[in-house]
Amino acid sequence: MSKQHVSTIVNGDPVEFLADPGMTLLDALRDELDLTGSKEGCGSGDCGACSVILDGRLVCSCLVLAPEAEGRRVETIEGLAHGSELHPLQQKFLEHAALQCGFCTPGLLMASKALLDVNPDPTESEARYWLAGNLCRCTGYDKIIRAVMDAAAELRQERV
Amino acid sequence: MSDVLDRPDIGHNAGDDLKVVGTRPIRPDGADKVTGRAAFGADFNMPGQLVGKVLRSPHAHARIVSIDAKKARALPGVKAIVTGADFPNLADEFHEGGEAASNLRDLAMNVMARDKALYDGHAVAAVAATSSAVADEALALITVVYEVLPHVQEVEAAMAQDAPLLHGRMFTEGLEARPDKPSNIAKRNRIARGDLDAGFAAADVIVEGRYTTQAVHQGYIEPHACVASWAADGQCSVWSSSQGQFMVRTYCAKVLGLEISNIRVTPAEIGGGFGGKTTVYLEPLALALSRQSGHPVKMVMTRDEVFRATGPTSGSVMYVRLGAKTDGTITAADVELKYQAGAFPGSPVGAGSMTALACYHIPNFRITGWDVVTNTPKVAAYRAPGAPISAFAVECAVDDLALKLGMDPIALREKNAVRDGMKASYGPTFQNIGYVETLEAIKTSPHYQIPLGPNQGRGVAVGFWFNVGGESTAALHVGEDGTAVVVTGNPDIGGSRASMAMMAAEALGIGVEKVRPIVADTASIGFSMLTGGSRTTFATGMAVVQAAEKVVAELKRRAALIWEVSADHVAWREGVAHCLDPAKTDKPPLSLEAIAAQSARTGGPISAQVSLNAQGAGPGFAAHICDVEIDPETGGVTVLRYTAAQDVGKAIHPAYVEGQIQGGVAQGVGWALNEEYIFDRDGKMENAGFLDYRVPVASDLPMIDAIMVEVPNPRHPFGAKGVGEVPIVPPLAAVANAVRAATGVRMCDLPLSPPKIRAVLDAKEG
């Protein structure tokens, strides 16, 4: 089967790559674009380590075919910070020690960003259910939830 | 901080004026981990690398009659194929890695099956090809002829006289007489004290039960991954995610018959391990494929492979009988533990036995452990290996005893608690333990006073873990600008870089931001045992502090040279040398930075390395409270509140200590409520994925309150005790005891999944 040419926008920049029709967006990001921040923990959409934002919507990039990204906008962990300035979520994850091994962290940060994009003032319960698709085996989620709530508060402050 | 650094044998213990230890700085590897830059196992690539994949047995137990790989070899793009015939057969040899001893013969046969496949998922062949698709095609073209054999997976079934035998050569060790025929029972161990019959005769009340747990997986989110290169001159390089680059080096050398100096292992960032990455699966295969193909080979497991072929920990059947006086004094305990080892001997039943009664001072007891092979993946260490299992049985029985005696469960545990000076059930005499302090902490916690509503229950349980020390190396190099690099050989799973940098900074008397911690490859730092057994902050931390002490001694010597005074007349305080020579009081203090800037003129670079074998790890104790609510409709159990108190010795970085406690609790809750290996009639795992093997998600858990009790360990420079493992020990029983309180029914079989709860509620209503 011949490869497909895909043009898409990743973290604001136009990119092009060739993809087998069956290639996942995750593999394209990792193997074609060298964006290895998105992780594969399961390949079946159960762990959320590959979470990215596609046209504003949170998706598991392992469940999206790379050619589906044609003409769309992809946001990955590599684009979360503004240059060398960390996004408030990244900063709060560090301040709250919300990561241990750090493998699930890129996915959790992207999922958290997608949450705060649509719900700037989530309750703890809303945050827990939104992030229920992102497995973390290290932290017991306590510090992650605190970091997300704290980042949400800071982002609300910034908007005022 | 003052001149205590000159006294390396005397601790800096709590009470000292610590500037860095005990604070919560941002971890030094943090920015890389929140921006996606940190390179984990699968994130590394080499030019010209091939893709390696494994063909796995679809049978739980089968003789491998033949393997025909001719068609696969002929496929364009296939560069190498290896089977058991490509690996040397090893003799029995035990290797102590830091968590548990491994028999290298078994390890090699687990990496690649020889004449028999012993579980669904056992590797039987591996290929390297130019692409993932070609490798998959090649696997499909390999013809393996199997003679399927009867299999056995449940532990008591495997112990039966007529059970199918996994190994014809296994005669039970540890019995009074060597058995005359082989069995699946690898070993019996026994720990006993006093007169069991007299102990039960003296009891006013007796409780007993049979308890079962299922095999559960460590569940790290990062699948095993490595890249290996075998160069034409025999020099081998491995990049892999593991709990110990030196462990990987040793095991690869043994499995492939190589010299240690020909292998260099570089640790990737590790995406969780919990004990499950204290062994090798892929690395020897990737090296063998690289040797045959002449190319670097990258291998990454799928989640299905992780479940079917790595981990898990044992399923078990346990019997507990306890006798006590009406005042709550426990007079006798009889504990029998039967643990699944998986395909090769080596379940953690030994540690399960040693920890089972370690929280209790009981005059008469007997603990019998059975290590039993089964047609399931060979178990790997899982956080406090063996201890959560036996604690589940014992802590449920203690809870029943409290109920029968009408005693508060914390009061009953306090009455029988081990204290300093008492001889532990497993041998040594306890010193500097903080167990009753953890009981006091939960008793006085706000949580314990909160009233419960309908369908709710509260459970209490305690736990113990030894913690270990062992061999570690650390190097400390001072830069010419007065900053420092601290180099160790222990992969950072949960923030150990931060604690190493903090301990070095504290000992040097400089800010933690001036210290850069590095986890080095096997050729760049001396040997360290793997990250496991809750040993790194204790043992490697001790090496770091001693290296810093040597550096401080050298800095003082350099200052003395600059001032032309005796080194005895130099004091080191907060990173600055002070001249104490009464004849030279005019000398202004010399900072570390100033001394470093002149190092070329005073003798060259300033650095030190320390290798040690740390002894005297302080044991960890934990006491937990769990509140649950049962949904009578669905049988679902919700954890409402959870409080975990733990003696941590001294928290170096309290936030990461809390994190260890919270993470251990979450894993324990999963073990108690949801997680289990499920096998079909043919012995194939039915739930080899995160959808069906359900680990706790954010919406399953409440905030987890961690109470750090600090009873310092005098053997560590700052008083640290291992903290990573004991938090998973009490939760299984804490949850089960809460469910008993909520339902009024003792449930002895984990997991306490909704169908089982529903059955109990139905029986009550019926």
Image (cartoon, coloured by chain):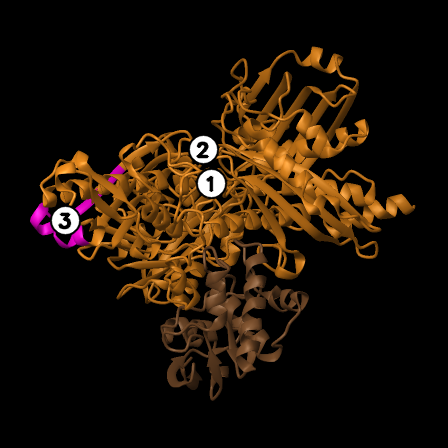
Chain colours: A brown, B orange
Question: To which chain does the residue with label 1 belong?
Answer: B
How far across and down, in percent of the image, does residue B323 sit?
73, 20
Q: Please tell me whether residue B24 is drawn above or below residue A75 in the rendered image.
A: above
Quarter assignment of residue B750: top right
Q: Position of residue B97 (x, y in %)?
A: 38, 37
Foreground residue, B688 or B115? B688
Asked if A114 appears above or below B403 in the picture, the reply is: below
Q: Secondary structure at mark 1?
A: loop
Q: Residue furthest left?
A: B601
Q: Which residues are magenta?
A: B594-610
* Chain at tag 2: B
Does label 3 or label 2 sit earlier along the sequence? 3
Residue hosting label 1 = B650
Within 10 Å of the Cα at label 3, are there few (<14), some (14-19), or many (20+) other Cα atoms? some
Q: Residue, x 47% and y 78% (percent of image)? A: A75
Would you name the residue on which mark 2 appears? B713
- What's under tag 1, amino acid-wise? Lys
